[in-house]
Image (cartoon, rainbow, N blue to C red):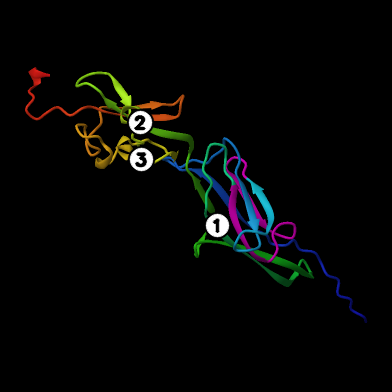
Amino acid sequence: YVYTRIPGTHPDITDRITVNKYDDGEPQQLITSSSATFGLYSDENCENQVRSYATSGGKVTIEASASGLGAGTYYLKEINAPTGYTLSDQVWKLTVTVTPKEEWYNNTWVNYNVYDITATLAGAPVTSIDVTDKLLRDDYVVEYYFEQTPDGDDYVKGEDRDGKEYPDVPGKIGYFDTVKAEDHYLPDEDVPDGYHHGHDEPAFIEYDDENKTIKIYYDLDVPANTVEGDK
């Protein structure tokens, strides 16, 4: 008798990991308004891109399989943020292993591969890739205005008042969820003599969304010997 070994077929066992794209708000929600794009690289410096993935509904799945990722080490980072959001600077390390298997299956010997994909962020293992982006806003410029007469409504912009170039503090705002006025008070040395200093509340804050400007107004100090009726 001559025995011929007839191999059977068995599907590969694949593996996958999900990338979730979250808004930085509370509570966190998937960003579904537009897609994010992630680049997959073969080098740690993320220079040699081998694949790209785009989210749909705030998610995208990366699969390790014969038609997906093969054995190797890869690096994943966001290359295009959803419209209106900042770009994440995090890089995830993905490791794919492929283990050949042979076993008796359905009355015949079969060969197949078992794929395994793992991810780490800064050396710590993760079971899913959760990417959080802050909401991007147009740049807002901070301007400072000073009252000209006590209890008056004649405010003049700092540069026009005394020719001094007042710095934007802390400068242009690249993104924010909530504007906190105290973050933009002038420091003491930049507030003219006779005006409320930066550690006190200015007269009021005005947000000019049309012109992308935050205006901060400072009132003249009331002399210490002035009583309410003398104003």
Mark sitting on residue 91:
1
Give amino acid for label 3. Answer: Val
Instruction: From the image, state whether disc 2 or disc 3 is nearer to you.
Output: 2
Measured as percent of width and height from the top left, residue 219 is found at: 23, 27
Percent across and percent down for residue 62 are: 64, 54
Residues rendered magenta in the picture: 55-79
What residue is pinned by disc 2? Answer: 159
The amino acid beneath tag 1 is Val
Q: Are marks 1 and 3 in contact (CB under 8 Å)?
A: no
Q: Nearer the viewer, residue 218 or 7?
A: 218
Q: Residues within 10 Å of mark 3 (few under 14, many from 20)?
A: some
Label 2 is placed on what type of residue?
Answer: Glu
Q: Which residue is denoted by mark 3 in the rendering?
A: 169
Can you tell which of label 2 and label 1 is closer to the viewer? 2
The kind of secondary structure element at disc 2 is helix
The question of residue 108 being in magenta is answered with no
Q: Quadrant of residue 192?
A: top left
Q: List the single residue furthest toward the right.
A: 1
Nearer to us in this view, 112 or 156: 156
